[in-house]
């Protein structure tokens, strides 16, 4: 875990316990194996991002600048492909943050989420 964190000290014993707790859940092995053995996606990344950009959905892209697995170039590419669909998605590259940006920079991620939620029109009635 420390290899994918910008601040390796954030990958602490509590995080390891939390992961073990999740893995120990009765559905844990099934969920983890589905991730490990999922295989190749049916649709190409660029196509998915373009189609998302065609939808009337507020979307924010949030990446950790120091992520060694999903490097910022992928977030930048996602942003460009999304725009090709006709909409813009705010792109946030947070630092210092690695692969688990929500864990390393929870305050910054919360701020981004609040901006997204505040910008969404909510109907006054559910009728």
Image (spheres, rainbow, N blue to C red):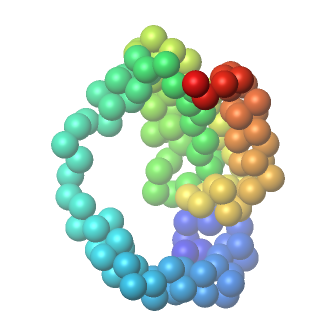
Residue drawn at (61%, 42%) of the image:
62
Residue drawn at (70%, 62%) of the image:
104
Residue drawn at (25%, 36%) of the image:
44
Q: Is residue 114 left or right of residue 84?
A: right
Q: Is residue 86 left or right of residue 38?
A: right
Q: Is residue 72 above or below residue 100?
A: above
Q: Where does the image place residue 122, in percent across and percent down from the top left?
A: 68, 26
Q: Which quadrant is the C terminus positioned in?
A: top right
User: Would you identify the image quadrant in which residue 3 lies?
Assistant: bottom right
Q: Where does the image place residue 116, in percent across and percent down from the top left?
A: 69, 32
Q: Is residue 36 visible?
A: no
User: Would you identify the image quadrant in which residue 16 lies?
Assistant: bottom right
Comparing 31 with 96, the one in front is 31
Q: Where does the image place residue 125, in percent across and percent down from the top left?
A: 66, 25
Q: Is residue 104 above or below residue 63?
A: below
Q: Is residue 44 above or below residue 37?
A: above
Comparing 104 with 21, the one in front is 21
Q: Is residue 116 above or below residue 12?
A: above
Comparing 124 with 55, the one in front is 124
Q: Is residue 70 left or right of residue 102?
A: left
Q: Which quadrant is the N terminus positioned in?
A: bottom right
Residue drawn at (71%, 67%) of the image:
7
Comparing 120 with 5, the one in front is 120
């Amino acid at each position: 875990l420390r290899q994918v964190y910008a601040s390796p000290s954030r990958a602490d014993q509590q995080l390891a316990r939390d992961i073990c707790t999740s893995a120990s859940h009765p559905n844990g092995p099934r969920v983890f194996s589905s991730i490990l053995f999922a295989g190749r996606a049916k649709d190409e990344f660029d196509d998915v991002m373009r189609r998302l950009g065609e939808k009337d959905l507020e979307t924010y892209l949030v990446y950790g600048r120091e992520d060694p697995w999903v490097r910022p170039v992928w977030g930048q590419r996602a942003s460009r492909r999304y725009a090709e669909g006709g909409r813009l998605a705010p792109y946030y590259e947070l630092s210092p943050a690695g692969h688990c940006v929500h864990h390393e920079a929870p305050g910054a991620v919360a701020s981004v989420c609040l901006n997204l939620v505040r910008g969404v029109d909510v109907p006054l009635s559910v009728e």
